[in-house]
């Protein structure tokens, strides 16, 4: 006779047997109280099955530039069709699909306007850039098992994109990929910066070093909110100079210092009260991520702090973003993984940090925060 299984294992196994039983599913769909729960679970399962279709509708709306047209509404499908270069039948199909996800709204029979989500998205060019960018993830994940079985060193569309566009960022070249990269980074960093500013209290004076933020978007946002803070920017030479220059144009040259270098190979600049890692740690596998934390710890004087802000795994209410989206995204990118707050805390302790604490954020799907002291 085998060893007795732990209580949680036995309970989960019992639950799964119950949920899988057809008679249980039948009664759940009919008993008041349970019926509402069963309906919600069925809807969640349906969303899992057809999620790809939702994205395709969203991308078609963005690529067709339908939202600016709907802002001029109410318009008929016949009036909209030539403005988005589709047939009237195809336009009506897209309008109806967009209606189901609140991007469009039929206010009267065949009279179309922006839906609630469409009104939010129409002027948000950064989010639209993210929608277009995700085509690469869908291409890489067309065969998800093949992606998981492949050597992570093999190039993918995402890994090629980041290496190419990242290398071009800050140069005089202005190709489509470079423009998309710049817009994507600035927008996504602004999302995170807004969340951090709403949740974390920065020192009103002192010096902050942003490690790996060479485009400068994060310190521009923080610097505008805290006019007496001084900033350093540490990143690879090909990006940090242009990032610091852009930050200096916004904040003033005396407030911004560029530090070119490699944060794995070179010493982290000293003399800063606060060091920030914004969406950097999860881009790297465990060994280099630990090396980065070790390197930062060596640079900090007693009492100085490190702030980590990024989407994390296993955050209540944001689990799919952490491990479903970023898990596959970073796998396709060929480097890194989302980590839980507990995993990051363990790494920080290993690096010699003390007084490690999470900081609650209103939107953990955008970022969670951990602060540690030297």
Image (cartoon, grey):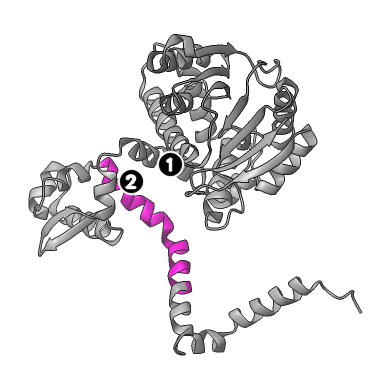
- Span shown in magenta: 41-63
Q: Is residue 238 above or below residue 107?
A: above
Q: Residue drawn at (71%, 17%), measured in percent from left and top?
A: 265
Q: Residue drawn at (44%, 22%), measured in percent from left and top?
A: 227
* Image coordinates for residue 140, horizontal then vertical, percent: 51, 42
* Membership of 48 in magenta stretch: yes
> Disc 2 vs disc 1: Cβ atoms closer than 8 Å?
yes
Q: Which mark is residue 143?
A: none
At label 2, counting other C-alpha atoms closer than 10 Å, the crowd grade (few under 14, some 14-19, many 20 or more) is: some
Q: Quadrant of residue 271?
A: top right
Q: Which of the image's four quarters has the C terminus?
A: top right
Q: Looking at the magenta stretch, what is its main secondary structure?
A: helix
Q: Nearer the viewer, residue 262 or 211?
A: 211
Q: Quadrant of residue 116?
A: bottom left
Secondary structure at badge 1 equals loop
Q: Earlier in the sequence, mark 2 or mark 1?
A: 2
Q: Quadrant of residue 334?
A: top right
Q: Which of the image's four quarters has the N terminus?
A: bottom right
Q: Is residue 245 above or below residue 107?
A: above
Secondary structure at badge 2 equals helix
User: Which residue matches tag 1?
Assistant: 134
Q: Residue drawn at (36%, 40%), measured in percent from left and top?
A: 127
Disc 2 and disc 1: Cα gap in Å? 9 Å
Q: Which mark is residue 59?
A: 2
> Which residue sits furthest right?
1
* Image coordinates for residue 242, horizontal then vertical, percent: 46, 13
């Amino acid at each position: 006779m085998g060893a007795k299984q732990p209580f949680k294992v036995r309970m989960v196994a019992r639950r799964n047997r119950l949920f899988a039983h057809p008679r249980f599913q039948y009664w759940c769909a009919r008993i008041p109280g349970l019926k509402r729960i069963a309906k919600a679970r069925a809807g969640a399962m349906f969303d899992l099955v057809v999620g790809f279709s939702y994205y395709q509708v969203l991308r078609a709306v963005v690529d067709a530039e339908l939202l600016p047209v709907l802002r001029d509404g109410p318009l008929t499908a016949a009036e909209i069709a030539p403005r988005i270069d589709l047939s009237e039948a195809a336009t009506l199909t897209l309008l109806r699909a967009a209606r189901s996800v609140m991007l469009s709204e039929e206010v009267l029979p065949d009279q179309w306007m922006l839906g609630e989500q469409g009104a939010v998205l129409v002027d948000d060019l950064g989010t639209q850039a993210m929608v277009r960018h995700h085509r690469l993830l869908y291409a890489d994940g067309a065969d998800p098992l093949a992606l998981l079985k492949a050597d992570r060193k093999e190039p993918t569309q995402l890994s090629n994109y980041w290496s190419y566009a990242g290398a071009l960022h800050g140069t005089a070249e202005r190709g489509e990929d470079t423009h998309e990269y710049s817009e994507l980074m600035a927008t996504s960093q602004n999302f995170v910066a807004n969340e951090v500013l709403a949740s974390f209290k920065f020192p009103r004076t002192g010096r902050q070093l942003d490690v790996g933020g060479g485009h400068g978007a994060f310190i521009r946002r923080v610097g505008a909110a805290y006019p007496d803070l001084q900033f350093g920017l540490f990143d690879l030479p090909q990006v940090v100079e242009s990032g610091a220059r852009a930050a200096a144009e916004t904040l003033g040259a005396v407030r911004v210092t560029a530090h070119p270098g490699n944060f794995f190979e070179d010493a982290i600049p000293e003399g800063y009260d606060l060091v920030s890692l914004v969406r950097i740690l999860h881009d790297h596998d465990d060994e280099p991520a630990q090396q980065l934390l070790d390197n930062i710890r060596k640079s900090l004087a007693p009492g100085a702090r490190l702030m980590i802000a990024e989407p994390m795994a296993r955050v209540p209410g944001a689990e799919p973003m952490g491990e479903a989206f970023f898990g596959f995204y970073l796998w396709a990118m060929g480097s890194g993984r989302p980590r839980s707050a507990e995993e990051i805390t363990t790494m920080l302790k290993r690096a010699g940090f003390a007084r490690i604490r999470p900081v609650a954020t209103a939107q953990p799907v955008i970022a969670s925060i951990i602060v540690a002291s030297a």
